[in-house]
Image: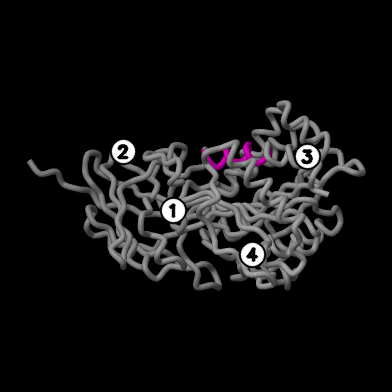
Amino acid sequence: MTATLTSLHIDCDFDAGNIQVLDASDPCRVHLAIRPDTHSDHFQWFYFKVSGLTPGQVHRFSLDNASQSSYGNAWSGYQAVASYDRNDWFRVPSQFNGQALSFEIQARETEAWFAYFEPYPRARHNQLIDRALQLPGVELLASGRSVQGRDIALLRAGDGAPGKRKLWLIAQQHPGEHMAEWFMEGVIDRLQSNDSVIRQLLARADLYLIPNMNPDGAFHGHLRTNFKGKDLNRAWQDASVEASPEVFFAQTQMQRYGVDAFIDVHGDEEIPHVFTAACEGNPGYTPRLAALEEQFRTALCRLTPDFQTTYGYTRDQPGQANMTLACNAVGETHDCLSLTLEMPFKDHDDAPDAVTGWSGKRSKALAGAVLETLAGMTGALR
């Protein structure tokens, strides 16, 4: 007896949702497209819900415009993520044929969600801020506004006493890189533990945290830009209240409080590894900064197998840095250790996980190792 398959309902009308239905007439082979960012041609992030799945049946989905996305080559070796409850996410078999990315699931439930990476919802962000503010010594130091008026919280963990090092961590300048705010949740988790490493760190330094730099883009399901179509990580030389208030806010607060170390947390679409990029191309780059970068990388490698130094971006030639990037701009302005920390959308191939690939849980764990690394470096930062 042949089962009659029900029609599917596909929805993305929710926080971070992004998909366009091209043809869902065949529930076994659905054709979709990813919508571009608002006021921008960038696209890669997708996130949608499917209702009407037939348990036991294989359903296939095709992102027909995948090859035209911002990083068309990144689909090779990539596996989409799925969830039945938006809590537990797992990878599903995926193939890229040079034009479309297709993935499939043998349904266990009638509803499922699919995404480019495990999403970090705005509701969870709000809960994270509330939880952080319940911790002793954590305060809402300032609150900026995005283009559309969403809050951008700057938290400080520490008392702001004179002489303490000022360590900045910001995340999700690129809104589709949801692993970045999972990382920031890991920072708050480690602060909440108040273990000996955290006590040592906060005795010498204050942490300045912006868990989500681009709430508009994240809400609208963007990959790369804010609501004005501005790539915030290319706005650190010309930030304005009109086009990039998110960066303008961060820069204003940095000028007010100072910066002794800066980590800008990101995700990389193509490279299946965790790595850092630094400031070697800056005009003001010195042997002191080079030594600090090496100290950071060496210590982090010792602390976790989820970090490595073999794979990453091509190093800039002296004086050839792109100064519009946050890492370079902050490093030059404040003469400090300044790093971009990249996590993969795929998996960390040196320590792979066949079920989840790189995930929110692993992003959180990496944050703890980064804090331990910084705790061991505070005395050397100046």
Q: Is residue 124 left or right of residue 293?
A: left
Residue 215 visible (yes or no): no
Q: Position of residue 334 (x, y in %)?
A: 81, 59
Amino acid type of the residue that numbered disc 3 sits on in the rendered structure: Ala
Q: Earlier in the sequence, mark 4 or mark 3?
A: 3
Q: Earlier in the sequence, mark 4 or mark 2?
A: 2
Secondary structure type for disc 2: loop
Q: Residue at x 44, y 53 (%)?
A: 116
Instruction: Please name the colour scheme applied to the rendered image.
Output: one colour
Most foreground residue, 106 or 233: 233
Q: Position of residue 128 (x, y in %)?
A: 65, 40
Name the residue that disc number 2 marks: 109
Most foreground residue, 63 or 279: 279
- Determine whether 53 is above or below 216 in the image: above
Q: Is residue 255 left or right of residue 344?
A: right
Q: Position of residue 318 (x, y in %)?
A: 67, 70
Q: Main secondary structure of the magenta part?
A: helix
Magenta residues (range): 362-371
Amino acid type of the residue that numbered disc 2 sits on in the rendered structure: Glu
Name the residue that disc number 3 marks: 157
Judge whether residue 264 is colored magenta.
no
Q: CA distance from mark 1 to mark 3?
A: 32 Å
Please say if the residues under marks 4 and 2 sit with CB atoms less than 8 Å apart.
Answer: no
Name the residue that disc number 1 marks: 116
Secondary structure type for disc 3: strand
